[in-house]
Amino acid sequence: MGGSLLKPVILVGIVYLILKFVVPNIPGSAPLPSSLIFLYLMLTTTGIVIFATLSGESKDAFWNPIQRFLTGENIGGLQMLRYAVLILFPVLVGWQTYGSTATSDAPPAENRTIHPAPPGEYTGLSNPVSKSPENIMQGKGFYAAFCSPCHGGNFDGKGPAARGFSPPPANFSDPTTIAMLQESYLFWRIKKGGVGLPIEGMPWKSAMPRWEVELPDEWIWKIILGEYDGAHQSPRTWE
Amino acid sequence: MAAALLLAGVSPGMAQESVAVRAPMVKGTLPLDDPNAAVWSSATAATFPMSPQVHWQNRIQEVTVKELKVSALHDGTQLAVLLEYADPSEDPDDAAALEFMVGDKKAHFAHGQPMAQVEGGPVNIWYWKNKDGKGVDMNAKGFGTLKTQTHQDVKAKGVYANGTWKVVFSRPLITEHTEEDTQIVPGGFINIAFAVWDGKRDATSGDLREKGSQKAVSSWWYFRAEAPPDYSGYYYAALAVALAFGFQFVLIRKLRKGQGA
């Protein structure tokens, strides 16, 4: 077979192992999607083929072993491997074809946007209620009465009424919910409820009440103060 | 290299879990009146958590039924859906309902109430109450619009034993009333939601504890009547395997000729 073919195979193997196991462990990195790994391996392979076929000499050194392997002439002990490759390749093609044509058995994927953009009139409003201990306490009282059945007495989204709803009620102690949002955003979501969401927020699934029907604006602003204080979070601000 | 590509090509799939009720197609008559029929064992039951209805007034903070088991079967023309849930007492006002969207428009799970930025559609509600002993086919598009249809296609039968209600709803998969009835095409996923009322009366006041909007509810989940098995994926795969073998054969023949020359 010759080392000229062994080296590329080892090289592709090493690149795969690095992408699969080393890159995800670099701080600040994440596991690569399989499609991206596939793309990188294709690029590596293409690079190897270009490099190996730069000169007529290296081209022969690269292709001749492949040709000999495929035709099975004078390859001795590799004959079994050749049969394995000749059987595995069609099987792989068949498997990929099946995977891409078979009808899916899974329910439709739902790409719900969790924090869709609010209507223009709800951006940049500031809380007209002062952040005094009395107002925070009053807000927490309203929260306990109106919000805690779903969002939980601990602001963790685990209230007694939460379990049947999908999507689940927001967990305010999670740093990716109210800590990422401005007070005006919360005002919109509380006032207009689930039915006020745009289409990408899937309003038909949300159990969030439209509180404007039942609560005055001032109470909603106080609830917002109580929520941030109780969940130990601060509203997002633009410096 | 093939192995490496193979490994890279195997994706773990999205981990998002979606629960669906799946109605397998069965031969023979469906057990429309019998929740205890043996054929129900051919359906895999899905379990859904239930919440007190807190979305709109009048709310309720605590409900009896916290979990609902749902199975379904169809025979190509009829659909039967079986609800099973624990209820400590049999009461005349015990009731249960299924809810579906109608047509292409999305509908809010709370009786298809209007949405601010999305034009919603109506919902179709199949309702059963113990003392009435029948199914009622209804529509709603917003609060206060619940209406019994003039043409009734839904049947329902409840059987209570050992602290458990078993309620079978049935209807033809397809009806003539496409504006009001959900149409169930085997193979396609549609949305389904549930509601249950414990008809127990309060010992002191005599009032019903759960009634009207004071009920146990779920939000939307998925439902599918399974289509007859589709083998086309296997045919395509077999064709691809044959083509790949043919390609190898031609390639090797060509290489051998080249070497001989």
Image (cartoon, helix red, strand yellow):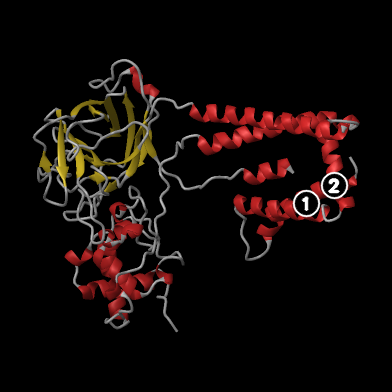
> On screen, A87 above or below A232?
above
Identified at 73% across, 30% down, the residue is B250
- B260 or A113, which lies in front? B260
Label 2 secondary element: helix
Which labelled disc corresponds to residue A49? Answer: 1
Dividing the picture into quarters, in which one does residue A229 lie?
A: bottom left
Q: Badge 1 sits on which subunit?
A: A
- B182 or B51, which lies in front? B182
- Give amino acid for label 1: Val
Which labelled disc corresponds to residue B87? Answer: none
Disc 2/disc 1 C-alpha distance (Å): 8 Å
- B161 or A16, which lies in front? A16
Q: Position of residue A11 (x, y in %)?
A: 80, 52
Identified at 18% across, 48% down, the residue is B214
> On screen, B81 above or below A64?
above
Report whether residue A190 is seen.
Answer: yes
Q: Position of residue A233 (x, y in %)?
A: 42, 72
- A67 or B87, which lies in front? A67
Q: Quadrant of the N terminus of chain A?
A: top right
Instruction: Tell me if mark 2 has few (under 14), some (14-19) or many (20+) residues whose alpha carbon lies within 10 angstroms of its own.
Output: many
Instruction: Specify whether B59 is left or right of A9.
Output: left
Report whether residue A232 is seen.
Answer: no
- Give amino acid for label 2: Phe
Query: Are the residues flagged by discs 2 and 1 in contact, CB closer than 8 Å?
Result: yes
Kindly identify which residue carries mark 2: A62
Mark 2 or mark 1: whose residue is earlier in sequence:
1
Q: Position of residue B119 (x, y in %)?
A: 23, 55
Q: Position of residue A50 (x, y in %)?
A: 78, 54
> On screen, A13 above or below A29?
above
